[in-house]
Image (cartoon, helix red, strand yellow):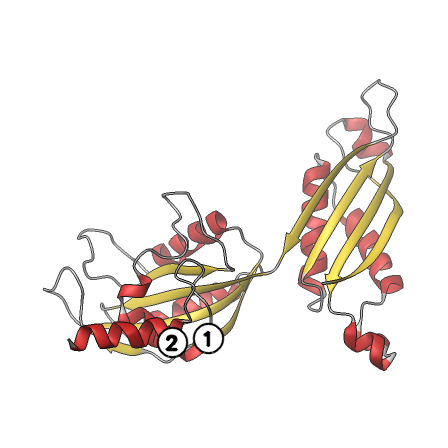
Amino acid sequence: MDKIIIKDLEVFAHHGVLKEEKSLGQKFLLSFELLLDLKKAGTTDNLNETVNYAKLCTELENEFKRKKYDLIETAAEKTAEFILLNYNIIKTVKVTLKKPWAPILKPVDYVAVQIERSWHTVYIALGSNLGDKNKNLNEALNLIDENHLCHINRASNFYETTPVGYLDQDDFLNGAAEIKTLMSPLELMNFLLEVEKKLKRERKIHWGPRTIDLDILLYDDIVTEDEHIIIPHPRMHERLFVLDPLCDIAPYKVHPLLNKRIIDIKNELKKTMRK
């Protein structure tokens, strides 16, 4: 990935834990590495195909001074978020925030934090078998898209499917969606649980009826070790009600553990089920 580098943008702002830091202010130095594709800008010589770094620096200065934070960690986080939310062309940003006048009573050049943040591509499964199923799925998609840290890129058709596990319940309506998000896997999982709660999901019977069910299937190409956030979803390759809608939007996405395309996993599962 190509880079635009901005080094040591000097901004006078009012971040810090101490009262004096908030009232008097101090100097900060901000550096950025912006990861994006510069091929089109390089071949067309067109400013619209890249980032106007003069404009960006002005906007970053205004944004950095807009609020007062105790921690430079928070200031860096909000700066990275601002860049990614306002410049779609930028895929990843590395922010280095230096505090040269840090009140630590020791002879140092500066104290700094450095963070790297990116947009992530996530595939989720949706299901509902209580109430207005179609409405439930669409409301879930709307709630996800309303979060400023998420964006629905694509959504599948909805498929009516028979229940698995607990059979004494109505048929499900299932779908899948591709999400662009700045959230970590844990943040996203907690957010999806909040969406389920808003749509009155109740967990009374394992695999039982529910107004909405939201599962993370794939998050970039990561494989997690955390038993609370298992990615890829451990049973997605066994479920046609997951693979059918997922094939609508990402048939050639490669499963990071099985090293197979989603459409091939689906076709193999169908052959197995016919035997």
Amino acid type, callout 2: Ile
Report the residue marked by disc 1: 252
Which residue is at 36% across, 66% downward? 125
Residue in front for this viewpoint, 106 or 227: 227
Q: Is residue 195 above or below residue 241?
A: above
Q: Is residue 85 visible?
A: yes
Q: Secondary structure at mark 2?
A: helix
**Residue furthest toward the top?**
105
Q: Quadrant of residue 113?
A: top right
Which residue is at 86% across, 25% downward? 108
Q: In this image, 150 relative to 168: left or right?
A: right
Residue 98 lies, in percent from the top left, at 82, 38
Q: Earlier in the sequence, mark 1 or mark 2?
A: 1
Mark-to-mark CA distance, 1 and 2: 6 Å
Q: Is residue 189 above or below residue 244?
A: above
Residue 209 lies, in percent from the top left, at 20, 62
Residue 165 lies, in percent from the top left, at 16, 60
Identify the mark at residue 263; answer none if there is no mark: 2
Residue 174 lies, in percent from the top left, at 30, 72
